[in-house]
Image (cartoon, rainbow, N blue to C red):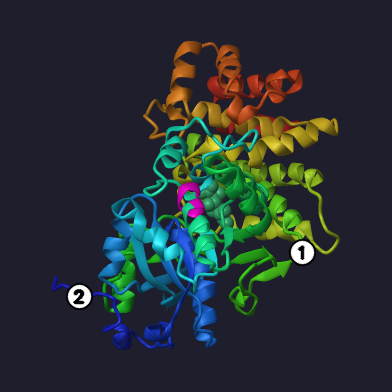
Amino acid sequence: MSPRQRLSAASLSALPANVARPAYDRSAIATGIVHLGIGSFHRAHQAVYTDSVLTSGDRRWGIVGASLRSPDTRDILNAQDYFYTLNLRAEAEALRVIGSLQDILVAPENPAVLIETLCRPSVAVVSLTVTEKGYHYDPATRALNEGGPNIRHDLAHPGAPRTIFGFLAAAIARRRKLGVMPFTVLSCDNLPANGRTLHGLLSRYAQLVSPDLGSFVRDEILCPNTMVDRIVPATTDDDRRRLGDALGVDDLWPVVAEPFTQWVIEDRFSSGRPAWDEAGATFVRDVAPFESMKLRLLNGSHSALAYLGYLSGYETVAEAMGDDALAGFAEGLMTDAMPTLDLTSNVDVGAYKASLLARFRNRALHHRTWQIAMDGSQKLPQRILEPIRDRLAKGLPIERHALVVAGWMRYVTGVDERGRLIDVRDPLLQSIRDTLENAGRDVPRIVGALLGLKTIFGGDLPADQRFRLAVSDALTSICSVGSRQTIERLAKF
Ligand code: CS2
């Protein structure tokens, strides 16, 4: 097969007519945004809204992305002049080349350049998608992990940091010294009260640098809360091949996503912001109702389908949803989460639930249960444990949510129900493994030992007999009859 041309500025004009592409002149675009954590989600979500803003003629908002770890995305996209394809898939397909990304920096290669870029006066927004573990916090208490090696490293090496806190604090301090307006820091991760949580963590970090910087961050740096939503499975080689054929050029790092997208943002920006609302985002005064609805209904049932679906032998969310038992369980879990929400009157949560179930059934997406199962220690607290706390406080049954916790416990044992190894990924994997090793094979002991992981479960839940018992019963059943049977049993009650 003769090598095809790569997607790039030079090949844009050769794309088929049905492929949307940037109509703006990229050489005339300023850098208004630095984005930390340049993964697929950002490229399929915020970068797309920003691409629309640039298309509308506002040239202030080009994005410089930064990877805090690997050079992969930069290496591939650099050869494409940072153009990449967004492929939306459901019954129909849509292809659009995105041009809002101007450059990618790889932080570990040259941390000073990232700090300098963050200090450019044109940069008004620093956005983040670094996943839950990128916040270096204790998921149960939301306190900064001050004793952790990365935070300690950054405090000791302020000129060459590794974490978001080191970079943000260095840039905030330098901008202040130079008399440059502070930027707004916009978390786009699935954390509870993501902006408020980030503001607390960043203020604490800055205070550890110096009390004066701590007060400055606390009083002057705005971190609006956001709710971000779009399902973005990891890109596969199959996607690359398929898109190469459709485009007539090779795009080695496209993003594939569902058509649905939502972005709800608190309108608190210190130095201006893109008119993302004109591209479909919603600016509100309070994101909390949207955020808890999304975390508890969408992400909560996603995690349920991930653990219980994986254990039942399903590779993707859509396959798991093809099994009535699992689909019914996901729906039941959403229904159980509903009374724990603090909703505003104009949200139709029934319609929201129905739309989620339809989105999960999208067979054109290959969203692996394994991908969602990753980093469970960071995800369970806001997705599953908070609703459990609320239901316990209201005296409501918790069987379905407890079964998800048990599913996670079964999953992290690292062996599936057919005896095959599971590639468990989690920042707490070592402690989880050590805990399991000490617990042996007895289910109540395993439950007791894992519940002892305070950073996940806190002190309250393990002390609650109803919770302990529900998780123990669920895990006992999973270990004797399997996850799927356990779900069917539960459905009968
Ligand atoms: C998923 C999310 O991987 C996961 O944990 O639940 O990435 C989910 O697809 C997005 O939050 C949807 O907006």
| Place of residue 444 in the rendered image (x, y in percent of width and height, measured from the top left) | 60, 13
Q: Residue at x 56, y 21 (%)?
A: 450
Magenta stretch: dominant secondary structure: helix
Residue 323 in sight here: no
Gap between marks 2 and 1, in whole Å?
49 Å
Q: Residue at x 64, y 24 (%)?
A: 474
Tag 2, which secondary structure? loop
Magenta span covers which residues?
A: 165-169
Give neighbour class at mark 1: few <14, some 14-19, many 20+ (Cα, 10 Å): few
Which residue is the site of mark 2?
4
Splitting the image into 4 quarters, where does residue 204 fall? top right
Vertical comparison of 20 with 111: above or below: below
Q: Residues within 10 Å of mark 2 (few under 14, many from 20)?
A: few
Question: Could you say which disc has been placed on residue 285 in the image?
Answer: 1
Q: Specify the label residue 211 is tagged with.
A: none
The quarter of the image holding the N terminus is bottom left
Q: Amino acid at mark 1?
A: Arg
Q: Taking 107 as reference, is 456 above or below it?
A: above
Q: Say which label, 2 or 1, has the lower sequence index.
A: 2
Q: Residue at x 28, y 64 (%)?
A: 76
Residue 361 can be seen, yes or no: yes
In the depicted structure, whether residue 458 falls above or below residue 205: above
What kind of element bears circle 1?
A: loop
